[in-house]
């Protein structure tokens, strides 16, 4: 078929010549030009292409001939000649990477054969040019054509013999390379990943019931081993032997070859034991060393925030050291990888940092890095995909293969973008190590969205869910989703409590009759003019909206806009302000907590009906069913009046009366403990010490003694049921309720007891007195609710101002 293809191509090239009238062929003197020294097969191929094109496509050489006895014979010979060269070029082009450790001299020897071919072809082209000049000067006879064909045949035979010699030499060289690993006593790191089989081995695909997908995997790699360079990196070359070796030694889908013992894949090995102890530090110097090499706007923001708050972090750490009676635990090797700062997404995010873009996530990353450093953990921070691949030992390619070595990090903090980057780099090793991941997820991920198969079947499929992690591995900005872990952040002003007390005592902490509006970009103000105007009737109203140079302001004329302020200047403005005004967006940011910590009263809009994924574009597609009743539900529910006032933004009278009441109200600065340095240190230390998602046993933290079992009314989630009793839902305690004995203790007479994969279970349905037990632990859900179910809820008490921790933990 290949020869037929070449012949067809040659015939197409000479189609204009295949008539019964005399034809002419012209070879202009300068129509063929080859380099005297070629560096590889590309130059050779170009020479041949030009040579054949000039011979077969031109049409001005005035020779009287029959097409069958002339150009057909000539082009057929050249086609055969091209076929011989293709047999050499194809395998060479497929070898994309040179073996590691080759010297420039060795690489030069590798190209000598191609140089000889190029020189030979160059001589051939020179001969054609000489003939073409003679042809231009004289009319060619049939005898002349015969001599020309004989000359071409001799040159073609000479080149064919040269190609044959070069093919033998290349074959011998490849054999030497394939055995290099076995013959060398000091293999390079790259060679260690090459999986070699003997040259004469004959491999058959085993049918072993212990490896049921082996045959399927072999067939897949036979068809797709070239789809990702990582397979070649691990030694796969398309042969059955190399595929079986890879699938037995790297992916563990096939049994080991006969005569060889089964070995654990290299990425399964246990890493070296880390013996350092995690002791509370009195310095942030290790963190500065980690982030000092990155000068991007986002990392500069993180560095600046950590530096401003360094003294408060150190003081909080020293207090924790003095009050703690905990035994010293082993130091954790922790990787921080904010994926939103990497790749193309990172470029867009970075561009917004200095233009009023969302900084809440950066606040959280800054505080997490400082917290882990004070707690004595071994920290690595990266915002580069390329560096991530190096840190985790990813194989070169597109991520189809496992990593080269065991993951050296005990915990990896990342976000949804980083989770996708990790999956794309780790291949088969990703599910093996996913228990070590912690996902910073501002708005939360509920269990029904987290389990992919369940989400697809029941309509919970979104772009952000379906990772199949333990729901507590997601870490939120605020404690709105108890199915997840509340990570939080630190109020910068609360971290300077001592300074604030001195200012209050000296009576210098006064408030002016001004309001600062929460909204740094123009679009946040659209449709809010009437609402802000009512407020401005009582208060001088200030804004901090980003204003590009040369652009006219779109803000109302009664607004005094300061432009985008640095964090220090923004906090200075809030110290003067009486009211911090929410516009309805952004949702659940850190700024209201900062304002309340500075003695401001937060005025925010109420949402009626509540915003959710059903009626709001921002929440659409997010993996949560939460109903957002105001701009900042945490401030409304956990802080409330007199620090937080929630109004109907469209009701001018409601807004005016609220402003007047606020002016008559005096408040002191307030910060919940969970948003202080000490509170975050306590919380993160508890997570690191007690959360173990790699264990196969049921959770033991919090202990069963913390459980307060409640049976909720129809249609209410366990979040609501527990909160109604001033408790919080604790998903780690669900397994204590998931048994028939619990239903009996609660006096529920079950006519039937079923066990299903259902995010509403365990629950009781009064219709038919049906009791349901949970079959899939990943679906234990505090958030699930349904009008036909009464949920069995695992509630617990919590520390004052610290909902993540139960009272006895400290």
Image (spheres, helix red, strand yellow):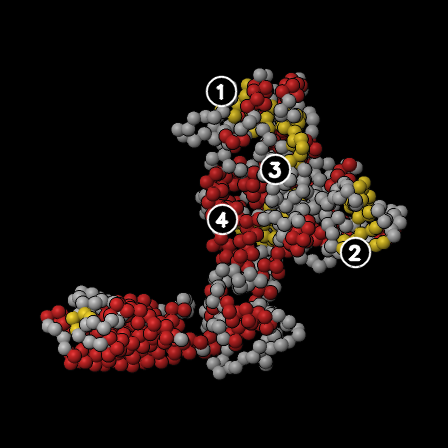
How far apart are labels 4 and 3 at the CA level?
Answer: 28 Å
For the residue labelled by badge 1, is the local secondary structure a helix, a strand or a loop? loop
How far apart are labels 4 and 2 at the CA level?
Answer: 43 Å
Q: Are marks 1 and 3 in contact (CB under 8 Å)?
A: no
How many numbered tags mark residues here?
A: 4
User: Which one is nearer the viewer's eye here, 615 or 749?
Assistant: 615
How far apart are labels 2 and 1 at the CA level?
Answer: 64 Å
Q: Earlier in the sequence, mark 1 or mark 3?
A: 1
Q: Residue at x 57, y 34 (%)?
A: 586
Visible residue check, residue 797: no
Q: Earlier in the sequence, mark 4 or mark 2?
A: 4
Label 2 environment density (alpha carbons within 10 Å; few <14, some 14–19, many ≥20): some
Q: Residue at x 18, y 70 (%)?
A: 24
Residue occupied by mark 3: 616
Residue 240 position (above or below residue 660): below
Residue occupied by mark 2: 755
Q: Position of residue 254 (x, y in %)?
A: 60, 73
Q: Position of residue 88 (x, y in %)?
A: 35, 74
Q: Are marks 4 and 2 in contact (CB under 8 Å)?
A: no
Q: Earlier in the sequence, mark 4 or mark 3?
A: 4
Q: Nearer the viewer, mark 1 or mark 3?
A: 3
Label 3 environment density (alpha carbons within 10 Å; few <14, some 14–19, many ≥20): few
Residue 679 position (above or below residue 61): above
In the figure, is residue 782 to the left or right of 218?
right
Q: Position of residue 669 (x, y in %)?
A: 64, 27
Residue 274 position (above or below residue 176): above
Query: Which label was assigned to residue 557?
Result: 1
């Amino acid at each position: 078929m290949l020869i037929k293809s070449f012949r067809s191509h040659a015939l197409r090239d000479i189609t204009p010549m295949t008539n019964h009238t005399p034809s002419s062929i012209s070879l202009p003197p300068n129509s063929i030009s080859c380099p005297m020294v070629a560096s590889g097969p590309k130059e050779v191929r170009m020479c041949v292409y030009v040579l054949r094109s000039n011979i077969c496509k031109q049409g001005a050489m005035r020779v009287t001939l029959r097409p069958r006895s002339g150009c057909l014979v000539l082009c057929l010979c050249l086609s055969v000649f091209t076929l011989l060269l293709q047999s050499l070029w194809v395998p060479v082009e497929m070898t994309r990477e040179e073996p590691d450790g080759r010297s420039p001299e060795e690489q030069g020897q590798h190209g000598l054969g191609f140089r000889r071919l190029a020189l030979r072809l160059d001589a051939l082209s020179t001969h054609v040019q000489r003939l073409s000049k003679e042809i231009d000067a004289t009319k060619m006879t049939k005898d002349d054509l015969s001599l020309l064909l004989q000359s071409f045949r001799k040159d073609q035979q000479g080149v064919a013999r040269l190609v044959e010699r070069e093919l033998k030499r290349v074959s011998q060289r490849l054999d030497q390379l394939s055995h290099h690993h076995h013959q060398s006593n000091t293999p390079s790191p790259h060679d260690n990943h090459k999986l070699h089989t003997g040259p004469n081995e004959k491999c058959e695909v085993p049918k072993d019931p212990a490896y049921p997908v082996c045959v399927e995997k072999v067939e897949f790699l036979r068809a797709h081993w070239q789809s990702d360079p990582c397979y070649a990196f691990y030694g796969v070359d398309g042969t059955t032997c190399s595929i079986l070796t890879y699938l037995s030694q790297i992916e563990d889908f096939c049994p080991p070859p006969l005569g060889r013992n089964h070995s654990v894949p290299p990425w399964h090995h246990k890493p070296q034991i880390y013996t350092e102890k995690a002791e509370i530090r009195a310095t942030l110097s290790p963190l500065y060393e980690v982030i000092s090499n990155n000068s991007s706007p986002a990392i500069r923001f993180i560095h600046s925030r950590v530096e401003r708050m360094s003294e408060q972090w150190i003081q909080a750490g020293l207090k924790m050291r003095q009050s703690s009676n905990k035994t010293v635990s082993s130091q954790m090797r922790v990787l921080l990888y904010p994926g939103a700062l990497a790749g193309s997404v990172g470029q867009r995010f970075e561009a917004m940092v200095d233009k009023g873009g969302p900084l809440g996530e950066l606040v959280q990353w800054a505080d997490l890095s400082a917290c882990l450093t004070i707690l004595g953990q071994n920290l690595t921070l990266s915002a580069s995909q390329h560096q991530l691949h190096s840190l985790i030992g990813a194989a070169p390619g597109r991520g189809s293969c496992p990593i080269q070595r065991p993951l050296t990090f005990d915990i990896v903090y990342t976000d949804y973008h980083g989770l996708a980057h990790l999956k794309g780099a780790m291949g088969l090793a990703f599910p093996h190590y996913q228990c070590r991941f912690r996902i910073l997820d501002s708005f939360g991920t509920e269990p029904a969205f987290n389990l992919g198969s369940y989400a697809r079947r029941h309509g919970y499929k979104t772009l952000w869910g379906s990772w199949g992690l333990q729901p507590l591995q997601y870490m939120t900005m605020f404690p709105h989703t108890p199915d997840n872990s509340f990570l939080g952040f630190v109020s910068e002003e609360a971290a300077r409590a001592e300074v604030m007390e001195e200012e209050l005592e000296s009576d210098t902490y006064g408030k002016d009759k001004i309001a600062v509006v929460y909204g740094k970009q123009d679009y946040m103000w659209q449709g809010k003019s009437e609402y802000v105007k009512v407020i401005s009737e009582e208060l001088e109203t200030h804004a901090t909206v980003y204003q590009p140079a040369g652009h006219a302001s779109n803000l109302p004329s009664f607004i005094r806009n300061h432009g985008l302020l640095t964090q220090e200047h923004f906090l200075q403005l809030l110290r003067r302000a009486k009211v911090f005004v929410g516009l309805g967006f952004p949702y659940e940011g850190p700024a209201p907590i900062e304002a309340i910590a500075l003695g401001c009263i937060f005025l925010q809009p109420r949402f009626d009906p509540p915003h959710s994924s059903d009626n709001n574009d921002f929440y659409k597609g997010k993996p949560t069913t939460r109903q957002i009743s105001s701009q900042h539900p945490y401030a409304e529910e956990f802080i409330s009046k007199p620090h937080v006032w929630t109004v109907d933004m469209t009701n001018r009278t409601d807004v005016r009366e609220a402003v007047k009441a606020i002016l008559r109200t005096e408040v002191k600065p307030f910060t919940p403990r969970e948003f202080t340095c000490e509170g975050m240190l306590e919380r993160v230390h508890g997570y690191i010490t007690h959360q173990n998602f790699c264990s196969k046993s049921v959770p033991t933290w919090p202990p069963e003694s913390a459980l307060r079992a409640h049976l909720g009314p129809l249609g209410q989630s366990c979040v609501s049921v527990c909160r109604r009793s001033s408790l919080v839902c604790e998903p780690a305690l669900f397994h204590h309720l998931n048994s028939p004995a619990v239903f009996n203790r609660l006096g529920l007479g079950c006519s039937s007891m079923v066990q299903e994969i259902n995010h509403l279970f365990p629950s009781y349905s009064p219709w038919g007195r049906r009791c349901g037990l949970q079959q899939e632990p990943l679906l234990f859900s505090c958030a699930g609710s349904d009008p036909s179910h009464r949920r069995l809820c695992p509630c617990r008490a919590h520390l004052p101002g610290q909902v993540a921790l139960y009272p006895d933990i400290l």
